[in-house]
Amino acid sequence: MSLYEDSALPVRADLEAAHQAQFDRFGQTGTWGSGAQRIAVISAARQAGIDAGVLEAPEDGGATSDVELPKVVRDIIAKVAVSPKDVDLDFYDAAIGSGLSDAEYTEIVGLVSFITNLDVFARGIGVPLRPLPEPQPGEPSRVRPPEAVQEQAFVPTIPNPPEGGEVAKAMYGPFKPYIMRAMSLVPEEFNDHIALERAQYLPLEKIMDFEFNHHDGLTRPQAEVVAGRVSALNDCFY
Amino acid sequence: MNPEALVRPELDIGVPHGDLLLVFAETIIGTDRAALDAARAALVDALGPEAIAGASAIAGNFTKNDRVANGLGIPVGPPVLQGTEELREQLGLNAYKSAENTFRHM
């Protein structure tokens, strides 16, 4: 059964494939978190949305995890999942001061952002939240890119070329805006972020082509109305 | 497009069926499931069933990006900032807590 086979509304095949790939990724070993830890993070983020009333609990939520998350991680999940507008530098500094690394923080923010995205999509098309995948065995790679430096975000990032060198060229091409580079401290999460962006917003090379319509039935201005209103409601300055 | 309607949705946004899209965007991340279901049905009538996955994908994507941007504290770059002074003032964006991620570097 494909991911959105039960949807009464049509879903583009490439969009469905991108979402299936992301659900699979959730259960796989990450750069800093094990499969079980990642499913624990995602489950907690989803539960935060249910508790806040912005998601409906599914009959079949899929896999669970018996990993007990530290308080600092639970605090990050709760804030990013439900109230991202309240995250600030003090909050980040307190998380890092509690013993979490900047790269672990980045992976957690990515996971919470990605599951919130997929759950909002499911709610939008009117299907129950999709079951979470079983966690897969394996050890995190714990590879930190040496090219990542402290720029202007809370967390280090790999700069655009030429400062970011050959790695930046391979990851970004000539240039990527900060929103696309933001997760580059954890390249696996960066790749997931880009894949979702391409499927859900538009291919990045088309971003300045205002005549390009990526979504059936929606013009680019209509897509921007939805994007702008969601970001305004989230108090997102960026 | 009238961008002021993004923060004051009672205004005319100047895009075909923009009023329905504004309601859909608000309800998809809101707590009123019945209102979301009604907004979805209205969009199907106006734009066709194929538009719903697109609108949901956009809403989900920016739900993601807002969390990535605020959660990781990225700033808006100077070129964008310099070209949007009037718009940011008009929309009240400078009052957002996340604006500090940009202004603390100025």
Image (cartoon, coloured by chain):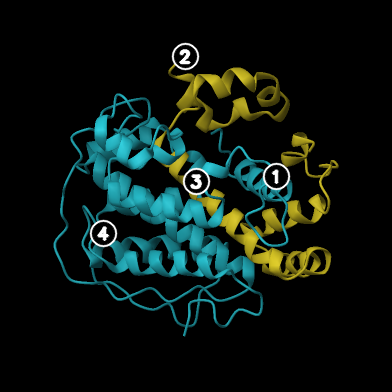
Mark 1 vs mark 2: same chain? no
Q: Are marks 3 and 1 on the same chain?
A: no
Q: Earlier in the sequence, mark 2 or mark 3?
A: 3
Q: Who comes first in sequence, dot 4 or dot 1?
A: 4
* Chain of the residue that carries numbered disc 2 in the rendered image: B
Do pointers 4 and 2 mark residues of a single chain?
A: no
- The vertical placement of B7 against A112, above or below, is above
Mark 3 falls on what kind of element? helix
The mark found on residue B106 in the picture is: 2
**What chain letter is assigned to the residue under label 3?**
B
Q: Amino acid at mark 3?
A: Asn
The amino acid type of the residue labelled 2 equals: Met
Q: Residues within 10 Å of mark 2 (few under 14, many from 20)?
A: few
Chain A drawn colour: cyan
Q: Is residue A175 above or below residue A95?
A: above
Q: Amino acid at mark 1?
A: Glu
- Residue A65: image quadrant is bottom left
* Residue with the mark numbered 3: B65
Q: Are marks 4 and 1 on the same chain?
A: yes
Q: Quadrant of residue B60?
A: bottom right
Disc 1 crowd, CA 10 A, few/some/many (<14, 14-19, 20+) = few
| Chain B shade in the render | yellow
Q: Nearer the viewer, mark 3 or mark 4?
A: 3
Q: Are marks 2 and 3 in contact (CB under 8 Å)?
A: no
Q: CA distance from mark 3 to mark 1?
A: 23 Å
Identify the residue position indicated by label 1 in the image.
A211
